[in-house]
Image: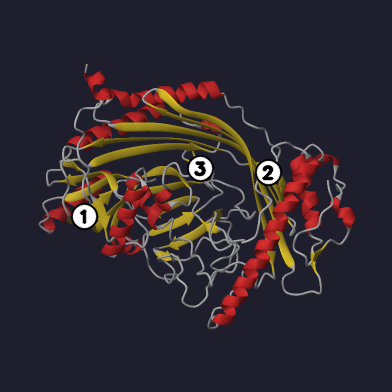
């Protein structure tokens, strides 16, 4: 390796000998990546600032994921994309200052204006090449921290002093766990054939105008080392299969449905029979929606069946059980910041007093089924801990990271998403909605009908499924967000119902289409009247995108929600006002082929 110095001129190395490979134990010799990470971290510990000062690095974290990704996209029995990619994703974090005051928390924290030389990372286990790439990444991370600290101090000098002076970073006990990793074997040809065959199922339903299935298998290993003493190596794999289908109603409205399956192991996705059942249900839902009448605005009692209730709670609580800190910025500068709707609700009732909510990343199964929200360590290397967030209807806790928030100075191991302003973001893992009282689902439906009769309502509403994760496009997402802000609902968009029914006095259910929620937010949770004894497990992959949009990449956080059915005293629905697309002038070729 050619000897160089870090581009930040104020840095010195304690010894030039640290540029050379360090002595390692025999156990580490076979893991070149671990050895390179450890040796480069040892060298980074020696970074100093000439003449002292406040910008001395106090924290280093080396996080590296090695992933083999296999992906298949197919439409109507034909593959449209098959790819295999091997990549390594390093995340080098250098913090300057101290635990009480560091370079994070400013509007532009984490942004670097200079040139970068760490744009690629070697895929071979070449020790010197790995060391060189880590050295360059450390250089960029340190310069980024220096620049961020300068911006932060300037903002503090220009702004009025804040009353709440919270530390910027919390201390944790270091953990060590170097698991033995066995890489998964993925049969590309077999998985391709399986995906293509499953995609052909949509061709049997003429009302399905467009469809597609996607398979993504991620066989990964993650290493994480910090100068505090944390040293981790663990399996970080994920498999997900999702499908979308859409049709067009006679008035031009696009209707759609989707389904996803996920597993923490590439070879543990559901069987073909189970996936086929799910895809058939999606196709039949689209067919039914194409011929269903358009819904109308409504406000009244609404029953969410267990799966829909889990989807609702994943959004209303999943997006609000973490409380991000508002970043510093110069006076007069606009900040794109969404606070939690529950920020001021600690100690307040947000649910009926017979409901409790626990988030538990340590639980791996539920009634014999895998919980994909299980993990041992979060993105900051902190062990995941069970958190009782709601007790007897009262909000007790937030899910936290190493960035302290008011009233919660330490992490409970829920840093699961990328976050903003130099910090990680908390996310739910395995969310359990528990009740101390419950009726049968049939009894809840009867109660829904009885309330309608008492209030002279022509019908009540039953929600069986939401479009979550969101399967539509960005334009539909923008329309949802605009509608939600105008209706006084959640500051975040809420996915619309896919399967929503009018329930009449005789128990008859009528499917309607084209409705979205109006004015629904965490405040609505206080209007829950009853819950069912039956519960459902709903899995999805949280990617940090609005409504966990299907197909979006980035940091992926598999999540499970277990919920009973929920009967609300009042939910408001509205009909979208957007202009509908025109019908096709001629039938599609695929329709004519199937008709023959």
Q: Which residue is mark 1?
A: 574
**Residue 80: x percent and y percent?**
44, 28
Q: Mark 3 to mark 2: distance in Å? A: 29 Å
User: Which dot marks residue 551?
Assistant: none
Q: Are marks 1 and 3 in contact (CB under 8 Å)?
A: no
Query: Residue at 26% of width from left, 52% of height from top?
Result: 516
Disc 1 secondary structure class: strand
Q: Which residue is mark 3?
A: 372
**Residue 396: x percent and y percent?**
47, 66
Q: Mark 2 to mark 1: distance in Å? A: 50 Å
Few, some or many C-alpha atoms within 10 Å of disc 1 (few <14, some 14-19, many ≥20)? some
User: Which dot marks residue 121?
Assistant: 2
Does residue 335 appear in this view?
yes
Q: Nearer the viewer, residue 569 or 2?
A: 2
Q: Mark 1 to mark 3: distance in Å? A: 34 Å
Disc 3 secondary structure class: loop
Pick out the residue farthest to the top. 596
Question: For the residues carrying marks 2 and 1, which lies nearer the camera in this image?
Answer: 2
Disc 2 secondary structure class: loop
Question: For the residues carrying marks 3 and 2, which lies nearer the camera in this image?
Answer: 2
Up/down of 559 relative to 162, above or below: above
**Residue 426: x percent and y percent?**
52, 58
Q: Nearer the viewer, residue 116 or 444?
A: 116
- Total marks shown come to 3
**Going by the image, does 477 lie left or right of 22?**
left
């Amino acid at each position: 390796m050619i000897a160089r110095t870090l581009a930040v001129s104020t840095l010195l190395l304690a010894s030039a000998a640290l540029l050379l490979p360090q002595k390692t134990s025999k156990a580490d010799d076979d893991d070149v990546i671990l050895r390179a990470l450890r040796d480069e971290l040892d060298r980074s510990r020696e970074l100093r600032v000439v003449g002292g000062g406040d910008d001395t690095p106090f924290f280093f974290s080396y996080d590296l994921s090695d992933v083999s990704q296999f992906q298949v996209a197919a439409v109507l029995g034909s593959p449209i994309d098959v790819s295999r990619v091997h990549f390594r994703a390093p995340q080098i974090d250098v913090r300057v200052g101290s635990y009480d005051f560091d370079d994070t928390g400013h509007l532009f924290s984490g942004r670097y204006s200079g040139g970068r030389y760490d744009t690629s990372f070697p895929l071979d286990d070449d020790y010197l090449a790995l060391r060189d790439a880590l050295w360059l990444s450390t250089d960029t991370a340190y310069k980024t921290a220096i620049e961020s600290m300068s911006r932060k101090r300037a903002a503090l000098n220009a702004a009025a002093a804040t009353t709440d002076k919270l530390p910027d970073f919390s201390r944790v006990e270091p953990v060590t766990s170097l698991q033995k990793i066995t890489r998964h074997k993925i049969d590309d040809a077999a998985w391709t054939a399986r995906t293509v065959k499953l995609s052909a199922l949509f061709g049997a339903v003429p009302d399905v105008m467009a469809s597609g299935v996607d398979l993504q298998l991620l066989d990964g290993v993650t290493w994480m080392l910090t100068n505090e003493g944390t040293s981790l190596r663990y399996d970080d794999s994920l498999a997900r299969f999702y499908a979308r289908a859409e049709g067009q109603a006679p008035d031009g409205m696009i209707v759609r449905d989707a389904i996803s399956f996920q597993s923490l192991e590439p070879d543990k996705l559901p069987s073909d029979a189970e996936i086929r059942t799910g895809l058939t249900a999606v196709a039949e839902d689209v067919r039914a929606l194409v011929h269903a009448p358009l819904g109308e605005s409504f406000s009244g009692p609404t029953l969410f069946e267990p799966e829909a209730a889990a989807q609702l709670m994943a959004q209303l609580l999943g997006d609000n059980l973490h409380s991000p800190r508002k970043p510093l910025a110069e006076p007069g500068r606009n900040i794109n910041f969404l606070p939690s709707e529950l920020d001021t609700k600690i100690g307040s009732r947000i649910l009926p007093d017979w409901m409790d909510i626990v988030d538990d990343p340590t639980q791996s199964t539920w009634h014999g089924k895998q919980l994909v929200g299980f993990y041992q360590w979060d993105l900051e290397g902190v062990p995941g801990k069970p958190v009782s967030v709601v007790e007897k209807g009262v909000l007790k806790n937030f899910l936290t990271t190493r960035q302290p928030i008011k009233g919660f100075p330490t992490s409970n191991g829920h840093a699961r998403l990328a976050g903003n302003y130099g910090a990680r973001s908390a996310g739910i893992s395995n969310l359990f909605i528990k009740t101390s009282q419950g009726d049968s689902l049939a009894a809840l439906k009867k109660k829904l009908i009885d309330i309608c009769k008492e209030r002279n309502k022509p019908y009540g509403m039953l929600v069986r499924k939401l479009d979550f994760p969101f399967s539509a496009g960005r334009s539909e997402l923008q329309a949802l967000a605009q509608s939600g802000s105008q209706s006084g609902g959640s500051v975040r968009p809420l996915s619309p119902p896919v399967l929503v029914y009018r329930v009449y006095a005789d128990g008859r259910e009528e499917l309607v289409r084209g409705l979205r929620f109006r004015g629904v937010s965490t405040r609505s949770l206080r209007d829950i009247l009853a819950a069912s004894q039956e519960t459902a497990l709903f899995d999805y992959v949280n990617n940090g995108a609005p409504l966990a949009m299907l197909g979006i990449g980035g940091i992926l956080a598999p999540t499970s929600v277990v919920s009973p059915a929920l009967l609300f005293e009042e939910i408001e629905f509205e009909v979208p006002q957007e202009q509908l697309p025109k019908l096709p002038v001629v039938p599609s070729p695929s329709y004519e082929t199937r008709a023959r």
